[in-house]
Image: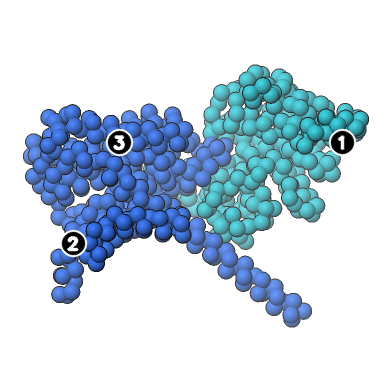
């Protein structure tokens, strides 16, 4: 128990940040799992974060109401973004979404009334670790249901081959639009969670650093199952922190090395249902061959 | 087994042109496919057969001409709307979804047959669960038809080429189509397997389906197709009874270059 408390004292905040990053990774996964590489989660997070900060700071709303509004705000922002961006071809969309990240920062800088501008904004409330965990569990359950329902099947089809999916009767646009809405809602929630964790947000909070972390977490954990981004966020947040305790100033190096190793040896990420299927197929084939060989020996 | 004129025309392709840059892959092509027939579409490689299938299913849009299906004009329709009218297809170079089990492939193919909405399915309402089970049972039934039910839970990409082709046919049948377009369904299969596909087309036809089949196996075309259309350089070369079509000197020339026309043989490759 004492060891646990020591651990918690040292790494409690790392766990909190892992959970916050899990929201962003899941938001990225939401679109990636429907075949869209997009950095717009940063924008949805900024909408959610500053909305939550204003609602709590200026209007005295409860933290739960602020979370709800952040989800709605992120969802609405994603509806607009999806309508505009889904006209673009995949790689142009990725570039456009990166441009949107830059634009977001400029907008945040130039709307000091809402965002505090260059000085940032203090958030006068914080979220407990338990509340954060509950919220993450609820969001994860939503992804679990999505994965195991018609949406999950159609999203996988659109991701693997949008043209084939369309000749089956699945609308790629509709599927990816839903993916964006989910991404927006979860991104908005994550933005609010970030605001209530840091208790101070600025234009730099929702910028390229976040874009890098969320995408790296998703790639590292695996973007073919909802569990992947969560594992990815945990490792990608915890690894540099724990490494830092051993060798100081290694944070960025550790991140880079971890990412390169995963990309080389596990290009589909740590959690990969397809790899399980391939292993199973290999085992089945072996059994069949063994049985055939046995029959030949008997006959 | 001549083309029976009393059957209504289901698919009417009239004067269709599709250009890629300066090349007309399909140049003023016309053909009619009648209801509940097995119709063969043959022609040398590069004749524009697959392009035509892509035009019918909406993956490409024709530059000129009309494609009409059961009273609907397919021009400028999105592929998913064409699929909803009752046209599905398979692909020359098998295009199954990576990472999906055999059963999941076919269930995805049943997308248009599901009765529960996506949101009901997400919530896991009892009606949606019952519908999911119904689709799963239906998919298993389709897999039994192509004799792939014993591999339902395996990853489709680990199976043989011929098996993948059969899964693709089951997937195409999932939406309960009126017209199914098979793009070289027996490529890479041996004669026994190919005949099995031939028999399957007759089973489907007897159930009321119309089948348009791109095929290079002439034995299969003469044995199983009631009507035949020959395409060459994007144009109509011959039309009618399969045996007559294949015996046609122009068709023989298009396939084998009878006149020893070197430039034409090059174009056939």
Tint of chain A? blue
Q: Is residue A10 left or right of residue B97?
A: left
Front one among B100 and A268:
A268
Crowd band around label 3 with a 10 angstrom C-alpha radius: few (<14), some (14–19), many (20+):
many
Tint of chain B? cyan
Q: Chain of mark 1?
A: B
Q: Is residue B105 left or right of residue A115?
A: right
| Distance between mark 2 and mark 1 Cα atoms | 76 Å
Quarter of the image with the N terminus of chain A is: bottom left
Above/below status of B102 relative to B58: below
Q: Position of residue A133 (x, y in %)?
A: 23, 56
Q: Residue A101 — which label? A: 3
The residue that label 1 is drawn on is B256
From this viewpoint, which residue is outermost toward the bottom?
Answer: A298
| Distance between mark 1 and mark 3 Cα atoms | 60 Å
The residue that label 2 is drawn on is A12
Q: How many callouts does the rendering have?
A: 3
């Amino acid at each position: 128990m004492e060891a646990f408390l020591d651990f918690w004292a040292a790494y409690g905040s790392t766990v909190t940040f892992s959970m916050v990053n899990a929201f962003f990774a899941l938001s990225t996964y939401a679109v990636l799992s429907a075949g869209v590489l997009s950095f717009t989660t940063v924008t949805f997070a900024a909408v959610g974060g500053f909305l939550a900060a204003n609602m709590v700071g200026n209007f005295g709303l409860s933290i739960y109401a602020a979370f709800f509004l952040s989800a709605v705000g992120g969802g609405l922002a994603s509806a607009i973004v999806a309508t505009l961006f889904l006209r673009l071809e995949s790689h142009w969309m990725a570039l456009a979404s990166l441009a949107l990240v830059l634009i977001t920062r400029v907008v945040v800088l130039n709307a000091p009334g809402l965002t505090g501008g260059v000085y940032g904004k203090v958030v006068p409330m914080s979220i407990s670790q338990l509340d954060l965990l509950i919220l993450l569990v609820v969001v994860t359950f939503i992804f679990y249901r999505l994965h195991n329902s018609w949406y999950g099947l159609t999203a996988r089809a659109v991701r693997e081959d949008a043209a084939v999916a369309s000749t089956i009767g699945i609308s790629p646009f509709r599927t990816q639009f839903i993916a964006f809405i989910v991404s927006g809602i979860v991104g908005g929630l994550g933005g609010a969670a970030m605001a209530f964790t840091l208790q101070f947000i600025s234009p730099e909070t929702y910028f390229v650093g976040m874009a890098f972390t969320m995408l790296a977490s998703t790639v590292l954990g695996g973007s073919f199952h909802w569990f992947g981004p969560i594992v990815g966020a945990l490792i990608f947040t915890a690894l540099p922190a724990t490494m830092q305790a051993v060798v100081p100033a290694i944070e960025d190096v550790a991140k880079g090395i971890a990412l390169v190793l995963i990309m080389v040896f596990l290009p589909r990420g740590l959690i990969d249902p397809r790899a399980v299927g391939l292993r199973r197929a290999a085992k089945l084939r072996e059994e069949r061959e063994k049985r055939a060989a046995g029959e030949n020996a008997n006959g | 087994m001549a083309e029976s004129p009393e059957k209504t025309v289901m698919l009417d392709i009239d004067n269709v042109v599709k250009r890629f840059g300066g090349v007309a892959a399909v140049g003023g092509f016309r053909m009619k496919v009648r209801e509940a027939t097995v119709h063969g579409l043959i022609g040398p490689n590069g004749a524009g057969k697959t392009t035509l299938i892509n035009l019918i299913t909406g993956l490409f849009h024709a530059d000129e001409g009309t494609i009409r299906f059961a009273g609907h004009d397919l021009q400028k329709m999105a592929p998913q709307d064409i699929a909803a009218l009752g046209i599905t297809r398979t692909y020359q170079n098998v295009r199954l979804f990576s990472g999906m089990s055999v059963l999941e492939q076919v269930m995805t193919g049943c997308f248009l047959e599901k009765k529960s909405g996506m949101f009901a399915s997400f919530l896991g309402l009892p009606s949606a669960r019952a519908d999911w089970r119904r689709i799963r049972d239906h998919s298993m039934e389709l897999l039994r038809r192509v004799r792939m039910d014993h591999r339902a839970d395996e990853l489709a990409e680990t199976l043989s080429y011929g098996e993948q082709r059969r899964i693709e046919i089951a997937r195409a049948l999932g939406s309960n189509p009126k017209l199914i377009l098979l793009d070289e369904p027996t490529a890479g299969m041996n004669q026994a397997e190919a005949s099995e596909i031939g028999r399957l087309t007759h089973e489907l036809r007897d159930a009321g389906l119309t089948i348009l089949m791109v095929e290079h196996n002439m034995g299969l075309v003469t044995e199983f197709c009631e009507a035949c259309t020959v395409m060459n350089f994007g144009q109509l070369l011959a039309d009618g009874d399969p045996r007559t079509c294949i015996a046609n000197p122009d068709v023989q020339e298009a396939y084998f270059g009878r006149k020893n026309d070197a430039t034409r043989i090059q174009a056939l490759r």
